[in-house]
Structures are given as C-alpha cells and as structure tokens.
Image (spheres, rainbow, N blue to C red):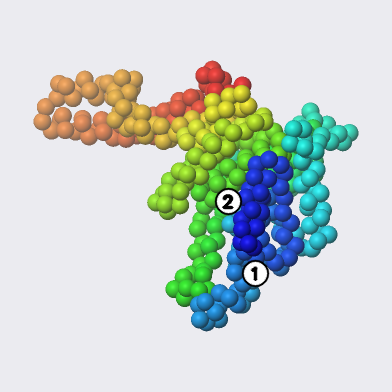
Amino acid sequence: ENLQGSGLIAGETSRAYMETFTLSYITGRSVGIGAYLNRLGQRNIQMVSSPMILTGYSALNKLLGKNVYSSQDQLGGPQIMVPNGVTHQVVRDDREGMAAILDWLSFVPKDVRSLPPMHQPSVGDPWDRDVEYIPSKQPYDPRDFLRGCISSDGSQLRGFFDTGSFIEYLEGWGQTVVIGRARLGGIPMGVIAVETRSVERFIPADPANPESCEVVEPQAGQVWFPDSAFKTAQALRDFNHAENLPVIVFANWRGFSGGTRDMYSAILKYGAQIVDALVEYEHPIFIYIPPNGELRGGAWVVIDPQINPDKMEMYADPESRGGILEPPGIVEVKYRAAQQIEAMHRHDQRIQEFDAKIAEAEGADKKSLEQELKARERNLLPLYTSVAVSFADLHDRTGRMKAKGVIR
C-alpha cells in the first residue's frame, strides 16, 4: 500500500511539472521516493548538509560487507547533485533558501495562462541604454556580458540585462553552457549563453570500487558536450513549462564534441533533445550571435529558426560570424594547395615566365628552372592561403547571412 501510494505521488509530480510551476526545496534528508520526487519536479534548491539519497550509507555498507561510505553527503550531497544537474541552486541555510525561492518566483507568472510579471526598470538603467561590456575575441567570462562587471580602471561596465537581475542556475553542471534568468527592460527572460573558456569536468572515484579513481576531463569552450547539451535542453523545458518565459540564446558555438567518449555518452541524443525542446516551445525565442561570436555547423542547425518559425528569430552582431566550417577549414576542403598553385600559374607573372622557359628548356636547364618554380610556389603559398581564408571569411559575415535571409 505504501509503495502504491508512492507511485501515485510520483505520477502526480511528473504530471504537475507539465501542467504548472514546480519547485522543490531540499531542506533536510530526502530518501528513496522522496529523492525521486525532487527530480520529477525538475527544479531544485538544495541546502548544504541536506542530501538526496536512494539508500542510507549504513545500509549500503551492510550490503557491501564493509565500511565504505562514512556519510550521506558522499551519496547525495551538493558535491554530487550540483555536478550531475539535479540541483539547480545551493543555499547555506533556510533564510537563504527562502530568499532563493522568492527570487525564482519573481520570474513566474501567477498561473500557467499568464505572462511573467514585469518590473519597472530603474530610472538609471533604461531599456535602450548601451551595453557597455563588449566581448573580446579572446576567451572571456560570459557572465560579464550578461550582468556587467568592473573594468580594470575601476569603472562599472553595464551588461546586456537590467543591472542586478541576472541569476544563474545549474552552475556546476555542463559548464560549457551558462543558463539563468534575468530581466531586459523589466521583462523576465530565460537566458542561455556559452562559456568561451576551457573548463574541467570532475568525476569522483567510487569508494565501493577500490580500482576506481578520480577523472578530470578538460572541455573546450564554445563546444557542446553531452552534459551541456542536456543542460541546454533541460533549461528550455524549464523555461517553457509554466514559467512562460521568452528566451534569448547567445549563440557562440563552434559545434558539438564528436570524440569517441562523447559519442558513447550520447551526444547525439542530447543534441537532438535541444531540437525537441525548441519544437515544443510556446513563447518567443531570440537567437543572437554576440560580438566576436561565431555559430558553426551542427550547432547552427539545432537552433535555426526554421525549427519553430512561429516562435524563433535570429539576429547577429556585425562583428560575428556564421557558417558550416571556420575559414581555414573551408579552405582545406574547397581551395587546397593544388588549387592555389593553379591560381598562381594564372596570375603571377614570374611563374608564367618560368612556365614559358620550362616549355622550351631541356635537360639540366629544365630541372634547374623547375626547382626555381617550386621555390616560387612555396614562397607564394602562405600569401595565397591568407587571401583564400579572407575570401572564405566574407561568406561568414552578417551581410551574407542577411542576404540569404537566415537572420532578421
């Protein structure tokens, strides 16, 4: 009877996420079906020293026949539940927990049919002010672009959103993507941005397996990995279901990671879930390629407005780029060294003179001229490659995007 009742609660919690706003606050130990209910409600705020576990550590030690685990936190504390994406936010105590709940509710409409609550922007922070922080071509913290930062000379650089409104969630999971909620001119919005710096994914050793060890996986910036692709899809579902948030995606991806381990870890499945979430999205979605950003290949495909043309629009900063491959890559495919050498023979006067002399020369003279010709080709090749890359880059600029109708 108890198990049947727990199943009833589980089913109702799963349906509730689809039908209304759900948020769990883990303020004490959450065991068994209680831990599952937190995940079924999807959005979780966890207080430190309040683990979510399936079985207590003492029971596991008895099952294993030896003392392996020493605390419940080893199984389901924030150090486990934040990196795996179950916990959205961690708080130190109940006072901080209540404040976090109220902050989250400030983005939530009064019912599933209403718009999220608007806030009047402050007089000193009008909606049409300039975005003072400009992303660089070098790796940077995308949060500085979203919320603003203090410059090296001590002045305040205001970011994209209303000052002080950006709140990040799921910070410790899928770290190549940054997600949160913010306001733009007082309008609540879901936010998805891209980490441009390299990060590390930490996988702890299993105390129950003496042969296991810690693993630290480097993850490159501007790349979707299985965890960050799953995080993107999860964020879109959360924003859509009962939060009714318009979303802005700061698209700055070079693509998906397609190595052996990532393919094994279901990058295709999680990347496809992004498309599924966009297809189902019922509110406005704005895709924006930020200054000095780029959107390439499959990363473009999974967020192209044609996925949900009634709800999605794409914009791009004049200094951004977009295309299938980066210019050096497209040159390797479409205009290789052999084609560049052919162009030299059509355009370079000295090479044409060599061609004429070689046609008439014989023996040692011909061989000497051919060696001089090869040397000339080698000297010109970096120049022609540079020109080819610059030409390929012209195809990736916003003027070309606009001409093809892929951005507004």
Looking at the image, residue 139 lies above or below residue 70? above
Find disc 1 in the rendering and name its residue: 73
Percent of width and height locating residue 181? 72, 42
Percent of width and height locating residue 196? 58, 45
Does 38 sit left or right of 375 as displayed? right
| Residue found 52% across the figure and 52% down from its top | 219
Tell me the amino acid under the disc marked 1. Asp
Does 376 sit left or right of 161 as displayed? left
User: Depth check: 57 or 224 in front?
Assistant: 57
User: Depth check: 323 or 132 in front?
Assistant: 323
Does 130 sit left or right of 253 as displayed? right
In the displayed image of the protein, which residue is found farthest to the right?
123
The label number, if any, that marks residue 59 in the structure image = none
Percent of width and height locating residue 314? 60, 27
The label number, if any, that marks residue 174 in the structure image = 2
Element type at mark 2: loop
Percent of width and height locating residue 344? 32, 25
Element type at mark 1: helix
Tell me the amino acid under the disc marked 2. Gly
Looking at the image, residue 159 lies above or below residue 170? above
| Residue found 67% across the figure and 31% down from its top | 283
Does 257 sit left or right of 238 as displayed? left
Where the C terminus falls, by quadrant?
top right
